[in-house]
Image (cartoon, rainbow, N blue to C red):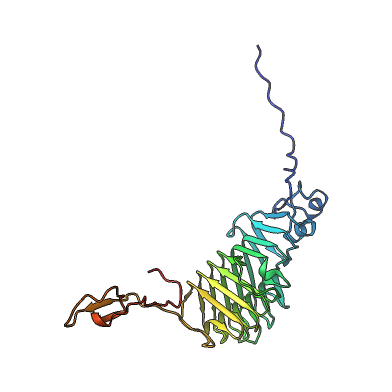
Amino acid sequence: TGSVGIPGSTGATGPLGPFGNVLRVDQVYGNDTLGATAPFSNPFLTIGGALSSASAGQCVYVLPGTYNESITIPSSVSVRGINLQAVTIQKLNCNTNTTVVTMGTSSRLEDVTVTCNTSANVDITAISFPSTTPINAKLRTIVINATSTAANTSNTIGVLVSGTTSNSVISFNALQRCTINTTSSANGTTRGVLNNGSNYFSVRDCTIFATGTGNNCVAVETTNPTGYTSVKTSTVAGNLYDIMRTSGTLLLNATDLQNGNSDGNGFTTNTEASRMQFGTYANTGSLDNGTQYLLPGTVVHTDLPTALYPIYFAQPVVI
């Protein structure tokens, strides 16, 4: 048998896929025009291009890159980055009022970094929850950075919750495993999370900071009389106040107020003693008084009650 000849050159690689119900965004090899013609085979260049072709139930998968665009996520569409440190959605040096991401009904955004900044007298919002989204849209594993270096009265908001929903308490969490940093030198409203709608909005396992030289930096605020904001197992910190309940209900559960302050409006703390002692001692006379029950503290034996004595706790505790 003779020797094998030299192999010929390899031909060009064709497109991957198709991917069922998954639209890819690739800043290096993507093309919005080709993506629109074959959305499950060809990658898009921009997230907005992919979202324009996405339908309910589909996912837009974003490959590493910095995407300089504002997006609106359609209803029931998910957007997922390959890694939050590798995928950034941003609008920088904004000179008009800007919102980077607008959530859609039952939409989802995860594993990305969302950034916006300005030095002009304009309002910037990293992520907005309008209409019915506060109770059905989700953010998961997101880093949010909103920064204003303007010395004026503009507003800097990390997450703006302005929709209208039922305010009944449910198990759903809109924000989970997120970090929000809002920094401003302006004297307008600077908020990590601002809930100004009549809705229920739940935050869990998040870190929320509102800092800067501005005089109105608050980590979490609720302002609507029928609004309900729940913050659980989180850390919040604001230069002016950690939390602010202008109106409505603001519920904290296992949440660290880093500066230990609020606006003082309707905010109370429930605490329980770490130890409760029971004791009794005998007086002269018989000790046989039948079945008796202890009271907190130390009580003479003959004064112990013969009926159960209730002990009430103002909050859930481990006994």
Residue furthest to the left: 284
Can residue 206 be seen here? The reply is yes
Residue 113 in the image: x percent, y percent? Answer: 61, 64
Residue 35 in the image: x percent, y percent? Answer: 78, 51
113 above or below 11?
A: below
Looking at the picture, tell me which residue is in the foreground, 17 or 263. Answer: 263
Q: Quadrant of the N terminus?
A: top right
Looking at the picture, tell me which residue is in the foreground, 85 or 72. Answer: 72
Residue 109 in the image: x percent, y percent? Answer: 65, 62
Looking at the picture, tell me which residue is in the foreground, 17 or 96. Answer: 17
- Residue at horizontal 57 percent and vertical 79 percent from the top: 250
Residue 312 in the image: x percent, y percent? Answer: 42, 77
164 above or below 62?
A: below
Residue furthest to the right: 37
304 above or below 1?
A: below
> Residue 200 is drawn in which quadrant?
bottom right
In the picture, measured across the screen, residue 178 lies left or right of residue 102, that is: left
Can residue 300 be seen here? The reply is no
Residue furthest to the top: 1
In the picture, measured across the screen, residue 229 lies left or right of residue 38, that is: left
